[in-house]
């Protein structure tokens, strides 16, 4: 039980139970009866802010109430201050709407019987009930709620309030008996309250009784009194009745006037309160809409301060944001400032990393807690010189500063102040601004996240669009959903031409041994999403150029894990394919070269053997010609043998050139001489014998330029050309051999010069 009671005590100490109107009554009582006491010092010692007392929506804990009461008893030396403050309550403005509501009930009995509802407006610490036990007598029971341990002074305060209720109607305190009290071991406190009737009721009864006596008495007295005497009595009775009626009406009008005045104040307060609530509701709605729809921070701040200016009753407001790079707090948006004041704010930076920075704005950021100051001069000593100078230049009287915090990260501060209005700032004002700052913080976090998302999306898009790879997304039906810019440039299609088209027919055709059909690709990825799928596809660009693409495929799933698309990443391997083919050709050439090398080796051996044989054929005719006369008939055959031997030696030399993979030496020759020698050669004579129906015509340019070349090869070339032409002319004809000088300009990269041109 002890632990349980301790638990209840701890709960009641930390739970707000008592409305600020109670403490406001204490403060007003002190101001009237103890004017020498420093109220600000009392509140500071009790750790209670004045704006908390001014706020009718604020509630205090048991600990705060106890501390304030103890300090008041100490400072005033009056142990009965709670009872006296309770008696003062009905004459205090601190009750506000509660007093006006009570007066609207018109009678003490009605108020006492409805005390349960009225008490709930002031305290959550006890359950109160009332019952009528007499004409002007009620019994009220007050039982502390579970976990609440009220102090004796609170019982005294309650007694004082009950006494003062009757005074609102009778101008006299009610009589209270307190037969049971929780502080005497009872479960509840019982109060028996009795009161006298109001003076207007007494006088109204007297008037009514007098009128009743007059109505019945005067007619009866007519039979007993002389006429003159009866007339005088009737006149006196009438005069007295009029005086009583007048006085009674005066008292009723006075009471009614007091009630009307009170209700007028109540109506005004209710109108003001309704207007405040209406504006606050619209403030929450409009700021909620702004924070939900605006993702640009600058526009968001302007929208928020615009709503604050329209809906809140503050002279000025502003938002300052943290500049992370420079570690300072900067003015970002505001309202109510004139141009010089706005310039002061824009030119002023509050350094967050400076140990000497002690301003409210910096403290709100560092401590992540709000501040409400109703008198700037009171905190002058705790401000830095710079902060106080700025406050003085701006003419601030009172100030609320709320940090804009999201997940323990401070984005800045939201501040309002009054420079002209004398309305005290309240806890509810700060609570409302805390709500606005919370909305703003969430929206700023969303805006920053959206900005970061846009930045990342831009980087991703730039990466995808500018990557030297073909990137496209294809749905499970084969339709193209996305096609990056590189792919558009590569294939020559624009996005409109391909989006929604079948990729298997345009981009991913399957034709060849190493190519993958689209249907097979879909089935493979659906059956095994983790499988690494690659393929090489030959396709065509829009210009009908053949290209080879190496594809990598990756499945894309939605939030519920459904296979919806394929990400296809392709790389152009056309050059690699051509390089591969060139490699194959080079390998074939190498094989041919190896074969030619073997042939060359064989040809070299044959050439050496033939040289040994031809040495006699070439040299001995020379010796024979030396012994023959010039007119010898044998000279011509021997010369023919010699020429044939020399040609055979040239052929053998070609074999040696092939065997050694060398280059035949060139010399300056004239093509006319080559042609003429061919026409006199035995080969040409044999051609004429075999093709007698073919005539040979020569047209040689006498101004023909010399060239660099191999006489043997040129002679063989001419011989082969003429021989091929003769064999092609089965029915005979004429072969024309012509030489001439020509200048040829090459379109390819080649040195411009004079060349031999061969015309067939």
Image: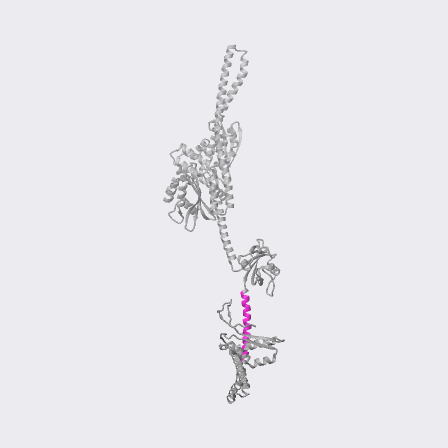
Position in image of residue 469 (x %, y %): 53, 60
Residue 84 visible to the viewer = yes
The answer to if 153 sits in the magenta stretch is no
Quadrant where the C terminus is found in the figure: bottom right
Which residue occupies the foreground of this view, 631 or 680?
631
Please tell me in which quadrant of the rendered image residue 26 appears. top left
Which residue is at the far right?
A: 731
State the count of labels.
Answer: 0
- The vertical placement of 473 against 753, above or below, is above
Front one among 183 and 471: 471
Residue 136 position, x and y percent, is 51, 27
Q: Nearer the viewer, residue 314 or 230?
A: 314
Residue 596 lies in magenta, yes or no? yes
> In the rendered view, would you say 71 is above or below 732?
above
Residue furthest to the bottom: 627
- In this rendered view, identify the residue nearer to me: 128 or 373: 373
Q: Which residues are magenta?
A: 575-601
**597 in relation to 637, above or below:** above
Q: Main secondary structure of the magenta part?
A: helix
Tell me residue 560's x, y (percent): 58, 53
Q: Position of residue 177 (x, y in %)?
A: 48, 31
């Amino acid at each position: 039980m002890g632990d349980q009671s301790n638990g209840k005590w701890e709960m009641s100490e930390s739970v707000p139970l008592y409305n600020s109107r109670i403490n406001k009554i204490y403060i007003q009582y002190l101001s009237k009866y103890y004017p020498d006491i420093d109220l600000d010092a009392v509140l500071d010692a009790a750790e209670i802010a004045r704006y908390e007392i001014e706020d009718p929506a604020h509630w205090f804990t048991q600990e705060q109430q106890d501390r304030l009461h103890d300090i008041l008893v100490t400072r005033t030396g009056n142990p009965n201050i709670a009872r006296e403050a309770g008696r003062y309550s009905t004459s205090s403005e601190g009750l506000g709407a509660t007093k006006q509501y009570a007066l609207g009930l018109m009678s003490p009995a009605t108020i006492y019987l409805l005390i349960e509802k009225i008490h709930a407006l002031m305290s959550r610490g006890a359950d109160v009930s009332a019952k009528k036990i007499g004409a002007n007598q009620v019994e009220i029971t007050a039982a502390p709620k579970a976990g609440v341990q009220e102090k004796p002074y609170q019982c005294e305060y309650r007694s004082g309030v009950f006494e003062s209720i009757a005074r609102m109607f009778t101008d006299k305190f009610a009589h209270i008996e307190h037969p049971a009290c929780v502080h005497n071991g009872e479960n509840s406190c019982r109060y028996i309250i009795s009161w006298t009737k109001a003076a207007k009721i007494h006088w109204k009864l007297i008037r009514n009784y007098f009128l009743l006596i007059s109505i019945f008495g005067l007619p009866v007295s007519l039979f007993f009194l002389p006429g003159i005497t009866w007339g005088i009595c009737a006149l006196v009775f009438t005069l007295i009745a009029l005086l009583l009626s007048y006085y009674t009406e005066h008292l009723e009008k006075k009471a009614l006037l007091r009630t009307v005045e009170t209700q007028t104040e109540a109506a005004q307060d209710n109108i003001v309160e309704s207007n405040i609530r209406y504006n606050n509701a619209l403030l929450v709605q409009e700021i909620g809409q702004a924070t939900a729809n605006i993702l640009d921070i600058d526009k968001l701040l302007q929208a928020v301060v615009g709503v604050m200016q329209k809906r809140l009753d503050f002279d000025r407001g502003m938002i300052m944001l943290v500049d992370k790079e420079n570690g300072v707090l900067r003015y970002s948006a505001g309202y109510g400032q004139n141009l010089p004041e706005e310039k002061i704010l824009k030119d002023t930076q509050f350094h967050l990393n400076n140990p000497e920075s002690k301003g409210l704005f910096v403290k709100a950021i560092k401590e992540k807690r709000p501040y409400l100051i109703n008198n700037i001069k009171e905190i002058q000593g705790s401000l830095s010189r710079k902060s106080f100078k700025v406050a003085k230049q701006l003419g601030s009287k009172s100030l609320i500063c709320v940090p804009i915090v999201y997940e323990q990260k401070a984005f800045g501060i939201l501040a309002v102040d009054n420079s002209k209005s004398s309305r005290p700032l309240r806890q509810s004002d700060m609570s409302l601004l805390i709500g606005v700052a919370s909305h703003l913080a969430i929206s700023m976090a969303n805006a920053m996240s959206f900005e970061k998302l846009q930045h990342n999306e831009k980087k991703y898009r730039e990466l995808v669009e500018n990557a030297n790879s073909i990137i496209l997304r294809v749905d499970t039906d084969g339709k193209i959903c996305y096609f990056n810019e590189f792919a558009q440039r590569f294939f020559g299609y624009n996005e409109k031409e391909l989006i929604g088209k079948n990729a298997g027919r345009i981009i991913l055709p399957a034709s060849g041994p190493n190519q993958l059909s689209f249907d097979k690709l879909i089935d493979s990825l659906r059956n095994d999403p983790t499988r690494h799928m690659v393929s090489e596809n030959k396709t065509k660009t829009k210009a009908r150029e053949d290209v080879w693409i190496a594809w990598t495929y990756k499945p894309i799933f939605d939030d519920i894990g459904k296979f919806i698309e394929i990400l296809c990443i392709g790389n152009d391997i056309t050059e690699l394919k051509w390089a591969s083919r060139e490699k194959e050709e080079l390998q074939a050439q190498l094989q041919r070269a190896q074969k030619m090398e073997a042939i060359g080796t064989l040809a070299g051996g044959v050439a050496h053997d033939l040289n040994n044989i031809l040495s006699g054929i070439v040299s001995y005719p020379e010796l024979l010609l030396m012994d023959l006369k010039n007119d010898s008939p044998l000279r011509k055959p021997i010369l023919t043998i010699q020429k044939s031997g020399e040609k055979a030696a040239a052929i053998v030399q070609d074999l040696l050139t092939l065997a050694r993979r060398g280059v035949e030496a060139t010399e300056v020759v004239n093509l006319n001489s080559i042609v003429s020698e061919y026409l006199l050669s035995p080969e040409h004579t044999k051609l004429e014998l075999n093709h007698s129906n073919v005539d040979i015509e020569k047209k040689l340019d006498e101004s023909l330029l010399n060239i660099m070349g191999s006489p043997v090869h040129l002679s063989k070339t001419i011989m082969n050309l003429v021989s091929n032409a003769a064999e092609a002319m089965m029915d005979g004809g004429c072969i024309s051999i012509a030489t001439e000088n020509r200048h040829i300009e090459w379109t390819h990269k080649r040195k411009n010069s004079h060349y031999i041109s061969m015309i067939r």
